[in-house]
Every structure is written in structure tokens, then in C-alpha cells.
Image (cartoon, coloured by chain):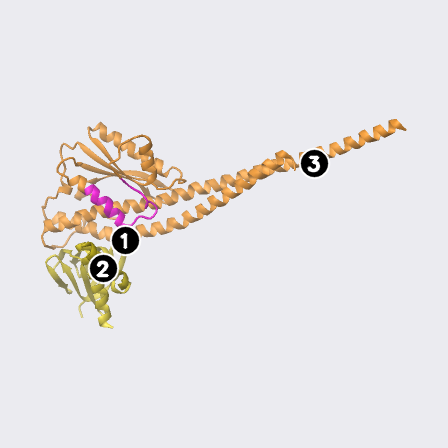
Chain colours: A yellow, B orange
Amino acid sequence: MAELHVELVAADRKVWSGAATIVVARTASGDTGIMPGHTPVLSVLETGPVTIRTTDQGTVVAAVHGGFISFADNKLSILAEIAELADEIDVARAERALENAKNEADSHAERRAEVRLLAAGGLKAQH
Amino acid sequence: MGAQLRVYKRRIRSVTATKKITKAMEMISASRIVKAQRAVAASTPYADELTRAVTAVATRSTAKHPLTTENPNASRAAVLLITADRGLAGGYSTNAIKQSLALAARLREEGKEVVTYIVGRKGVGYYGFRNLAVANSWTGFSDKPTYGDAKTIAADLIEAFTAETGGVDELHLVSTEFVSMLTQNAVDNRLLPLKLDEVELSDGAAAKNQIFPLYDFEPSAEGVLDALLPRYVESRIYNALLQSAASEHAARRRAMKSATDNAGELIKSLTRLANSARQAEITQEISEIVGGANALADASAGSE
């Protein structure tokens, strides 16, 4: 099966890299799925979960805050200022952050916390 | 124990205590250099990908952006100076400050007003003591900067750069480049306006020499550039902060190593002095006893 090479990179570390069959990410114009052989694309990411289906039928979910994806030559780079894999996310902390953000009516922080919970929850549903 | 010997003993004790402290600081810094270097290495993939993407947009589209537009009659220049929060790092902060003063003098010669931004307590202290104007300063993270710190700084500087009135036309960055454990250089670079055809990857190769695929830009080339350029500035500042942190630790390690060596030398020479003082004391006591015995013997010989 055709596969593409994915690098998920945060500002201060490399978060994940490996082979995948499809990557779904939230771009400025909505959810975009990238499969092998996609036309070269460079697009801005929204805060949202990124789902990577790996070649061994696994799923990697990450919460990504700001950044962009670039795809060329079957190589996809996902660059984010902050990126957390689902199993790195502290659910209790994210819930507290969501609560705080709601109280302070900080819509950006609220969205960030929601995405974190979404990414962490998405993984749990798989198990 | 004689007064002189006691003084020497006390000084040896105090120098030994100082030596223990400097030795500990030396070892702490040595371990932190490695960590700081690792942080620099960990941030390179992001910086390189970002550089590639920015160059790709710039070469494929003719989009103009405020951050890349040169003002032909620039009148105000901002200087961001990165120094340490703590002292005992040899010439680290001093060298960076000197570099920034030289740069400021050069900019003034070109007829530009200089606005100073400072990272680190040492720089803030230097400018504060001399009553030099500082537009803004950030402290408390010089030895372990995070991306969030770089973002805060970049947000302020980009705002000053893009402001319609009262803003700045150029942004220069004075930081310390980590060359090796033994060499760190204070350098100044112009960060804004960006010259996209001079952008380099981490291995020093010019990014524009690469051939880029025909990207589809989403939402548009301008939109992508709009989103990327602030990130690029942030990542440049982040890299400068990390390199400076590594340099700070390296400078501190070297300063503390020579302090430890000097303390060792001092202890050695003080021990010599203490030994001879002790010997002199013993000699004096013996001659006093002999002299006393002789005097007694003479006195009793006279009375018989």
C-alpha cells in the first residue's frame, strides 16, 4: 500500500515521525485529509486535533495549536508551536484549564483545552 | 596558637569553602551546557522546516508583506539585547552589552534613533544604572528559555515594527552565538525587515538554492505568508535565546573553573605560609625555653 512519511514537529522538539496512510488535519478551510500522492500543498492549521493513520493500522492523535502543514514528494511536515500526543495529555489538567477558560471567557484558551480533551478522548474511544 | 597562624588557618578555611561553592557551580553549569545544546538541537527541525516553507512561499509568489518591506528612510531602529539573569559568568553579559553599544553607536551614525529592548537582569541593571532608556525588558528565563518566552518577546517587537506611528523601521538582535565549549561570540544580526533571499538553513546552506515543488497555498500565498512570517521571527528569537543560554552556561563553567583553580592555588600558598608561621612559632618557643633555662642556670650559678 502506498504510504507517506509524516513528521510532526513542535517548536521545541520532534513529536512524532513515521509512515502513514492518511493524515487528517484541521486547516483554515476545514478538515483536510492528505493521502499519498497528494498535490504539493502548504496550508495554515487551525487549533485542532490531527489524526494520523499509521501503516500498521494504528492511530496517532495529537492536539495541535497553531502552525501549518506542508506536503511534497510524499513527505508531510506538520509544524506546530505546541503539539501534544494524545497519551501525553493530562486529562484532569485539561479539564481544569477548560473550566478556568470558561470562567474567564477566554475563547482561545477554551478552544485549546477542548482540543486537548478531544484528542485525548479520541484515543480512549479506540481502546 | 599564635595570632599569625590563626589568621592563616582562618583564611584557608574560608577559601576552601569558596572553592567548594565554585566547584559545585562549575559542575552544575557543565551539566546544563549539555542540556542547553540538546534544546538547540531539538529546535532545529522546526526552524529548518519553517525556513524552507517561508522561502517556498517567497519564491513562488510575489506577495508583499509588512515584515519584508524595507523603509527607504528608516529613522528608528530597535535593538534586542540578550544577556544573563545572573552574574558569575565571566565576560558573557559584558561582551553582549559592549556589542549592543557598538551597534547602537553605528546606528546613530546612520542617523537612526535607537530603541532598546533587553532580556536578562544583567542588561537591565547596566542600562538602569546609567539611566539609559529601555523600551521593554524581560527577565527570569535567561538560563532556560521556552518557546512561550520567545513568543512574548516577538509579539511585542512585531507590534512595534508594524505600528503605523511611533513604531520602529528596523529590528536588530544582539545575542551570543555558541560556537563550542570554549568559544562564544557576541554577534548582532538584522532580524527585520526580513531579507528572504538571504535566509539560511541550520547547516549554513542558503535556502533559496533549493528547488521547491509547486505548492498549492491555502488559504492563499498572502494568507500563508501572513501566518508564517511572525512564526519565523519567533523561531529566530527562540533560537537566539537558546544559543545565548548555552553560551551563558559555557561562560559560567569557564569562569567557575578558573575561580576553583585560583582557590586551589591560594590554599596551597596559604598552607605554605601557615607552615612557616607554625615553624617560626616553634623555633621562637624553643629559643625562649633555652634562653630561660640559661638565665636560670646563670642565676643559680651566681648564688652558689
Residue on which the image places disc 3: B282
Q: Is residue A37 visible?
A: no
Q: Quadrant of the C terminus of chain B?
A: top right
Q: Is residue B129 visible?
A: yes
Q: Are marks 3 and 1 in contact (CB under 8 Å)?
A: no
Q: Amino acid at mark 2?
A: Glu
- Please report the bounds of the magenta region as a residue range: B137-158
Residue on which the image places disc 2: A99
Q: Amino acid at mark 1?
A: Asp
Q: Secondary structure at mark 3?
A: helix
Q: Residue B120, percent across and down? A: 32, 41
Q: Residues within 10 Å of mark 3 (few under 14, many from 20)?
A: few
| CA distance separating discs 3 and 2 | 79 Å
Mark 1 vs mark 2: tell me if same chain. Answer: yes
In the rendered image, residue B104 lying in the magenta stretch gets the answer no
Q: Is residue A117 above or below residue B162?
A: below
Q: Mark 1 or mark 2: which comes first in sequence?
A: 1
Q: Secondary structure at mark 1?
A: loop
Q: Residue B74, percent across and down? A: 16, 33
Q: Amino acid at mark 3?
A: Ile
Residue on which the image places disc 1: A12
> Which quadrant would residue B302 be assigned to in this image?
top right
| Residue B299 relative to residue B289: left or right | right
Q: Residues within 10 Å of mark 1 (few under 14, many from 20)?
A: many
